[in-house]
Amino acid sequence: MFMSFFASIRWQDIIDILLNSYILFRLYVLFRETYVFRVLTGLALLWIFQRIAVFFGLILTSWVLQGITAVAALIIIIVFRNEIRSVLQAKNLKAILWGFPQKIVPTTIQIIVDSVNALSKRHTGALIVLPAKEDLKDMVHSGIPLRGLVSKEMLTSIFWGDNPVHDGAAIIEGDRIAEVGVILPLSYRSDLPSHYGTRHRAAFGLAETTDALIVIVSEETGKVLVAKDSNIEEIQGDTDLIKILQEHMGVYEEENGYQKKENFKISIAAIVSVFFITGMWFSFSKGLDSLITLEIPAEYTKRDPRFEIVNASVHTVRLDIAGSGALIKSIQPDQVQVKLDLGNAVVGQNIFSITQENITLPPGIFLRKVVPSVIEVTLDETIKREIPVQIDWVGELPKGLVLSEIFFDPEKIEVIGGKRILENLSTIYTEKVHLESIKTSGTMFANLALTPAALKIAPGSKDKIRIAYVIKPRIE
Amino acid sequence: MVRRYRFYIFLFVLLYANLFFVHRTFSQNHQNSVADTVQNSPILDHAVMCEEVTDKDPINPAVVFSIKIGKVSCFSVFDPVPEKTFVYHKWFHKDNPSTNKRLTVQPPRWATYSSIQLRETDKGPWRVEISDRKGNLLHILRFSITD
């Protein structure tokens, strides 16, 4: 059963699923972590609840939910027009179809490095202490607690010249600035270079007595140095500083870990999209098979203009079609057509078989039966012919009168119609003309009655007959 | 140059003259044949539909007749009648042939008529086609049978 089920899936169905899965996945990538996505999710849940309400026959609930979902699309476009516009105004199509908007979350290390660079450029002296395992409480004093999140703006403003705490050091614990304005112990080593000032000595003093790492920005030169474990070294570039900080803080996998988490989320989203769309596809195409019968008029194409159809064995064709309930309900009248090609038809009787090729059905709808399977169509060549007219009198003349003579115009009419019909037609009659009202001679008009209805009066010919009649008394 | 081609010119003139005279002869013969036919056929002087014929006179000629009268006649007068011959009165009801009457006419002048008995199913439009012995249509009379 499973083999036949999978065998019935066409390559078009696979493309259908993949295409819609990708569209859903792109919607997630472009609008994730925005209000748009959350609202869309909420609407999807509303729609599901509405279907459940319909299933259980909850009339009021389904009516309310149906009303909300009906206007939801409009609400989304109006309320989230800015978010939608920012996505659609992306620099290039690639960004919409393929790009992954990166959420850049700078790490603590990156913030410290950026801050140090900024301070170095401005020759702003700074001391940044990063403790390790040892507690610094006994070694430092006069610190002012801050407990603020590390940010570039915060760090650069702490060491700004007019800031009261700029002379001290800032202690960073984790991702927070724990204390500012901290006084560090000075080193009394005599072998330090002479150009090292108080700042350097303070850093060195803490480094030689604890396992902390101190970053120094020289006010005079703008150079960046790092002091740790009785060593002090000058930093040449960001990479060196990042490496030293990573080693000290043990956060090698921090950035890589974040990226891996993001990739994992995207992969899950892609898989969920495929499963969701596949489920929807099955519910549309395979679930709840419905069978209905439609009466469709037969259409004829490519008829030679010289010929006309004088007779057809049937005018409508009965089609038994099947498909999922949702698709069957949504069929529009113009989506189902029966067309017969008269390109090769000849004058006289033509027999056409109605097959799958003659029938147009919407995708997902299948043909089960056609009745009748054959149509006979009679074609005839169109000609023009002049045919005599006769008045069709009915009723009874008043007693004692005879209608002795009539003169009518036109006496002949040019008629257009099928050759087979016109060749055998010798008279065109008027509509019934009643005698009861005729008492004296006079004139009247009568319309023509063209039979069969396929006949037409040629352009330029009159379609009304003027009748002049003569009434005489009857000779008894 | 004319002297060189005079033989061919003569041949051309001969050919053309031959064609011309042959055509004239053919036309003449054809016209003679038609004239001959026309001359021998009776000429229809007048014809009417009427309720009955009494003493060779049509009574109550009309184009509409009531079914109640029971009968209708087609009266036709031929003048002249070159030789004894016969004519046809072909009756059609709603374009369907109903009956065909063969009537003898004799020189010099002859009146004749044909009649049909009317039934309830005979209501509707009729026509009578008058033709000669060879089937040439001489006249059509159209009428209706009503209530």
Image (tube, coloured by chain):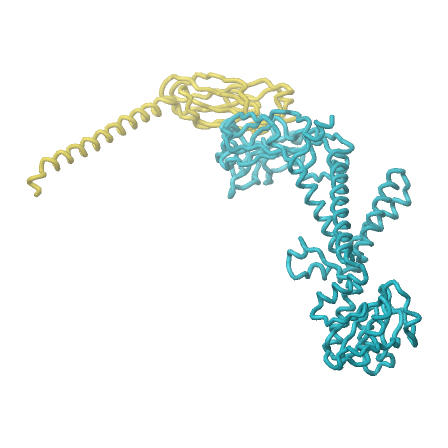
Chain colours: A cyan, B yellow
Please state if A305 lies on the left or on the right of A356 as rendered. Answer: left
- Image height check: is A17 above or below A375? below
Name the residue nearer the viewer: B24 or A405. B24
Image quarter of residue A58:
top right
Tally of numbered discs:
0
Q: Which residue is at the far left?
A: B3
Q: Nearer the viewer, residue A290 or A403?
A: A290
Residue at 90% x, 69% y: name it: A136
| Left or right of A30 on screen, residue B83 | left
Q: Position of residue A148 (x, y in %)?
A: 88, 69
Residue beneath the point at 59% across and 28% down: A312
The quarter of the rendered structure image containing the N terminus of chain B is top left
Looking at the rendered image, the quarter that the C terminus of chain B falls into is top right
x and y percent of residue B5 in the render?
9, 39
Question: On screen, A475 above or below A95?
Answer: above
* Residue B113 drawn above or below residue A208: above
Residue A64 place in picture, x, y as percent: 88, 48
Quarter location, residue A279: top right
The residue lying toward the viewer, choosing from B86 and A7, is A7
Instruction: Name the residue rendered at 76%, 49% in the picture.
Output: A264
Side (left or right) of A299 relative to A56: left
Residue at horizontal 57 percent and vertical 38 percent from the top: A467
Front-most of B102 and A70? A70
**Residue A104 in view (yes/no):** yes
Residue A475 visible in the shown view = no
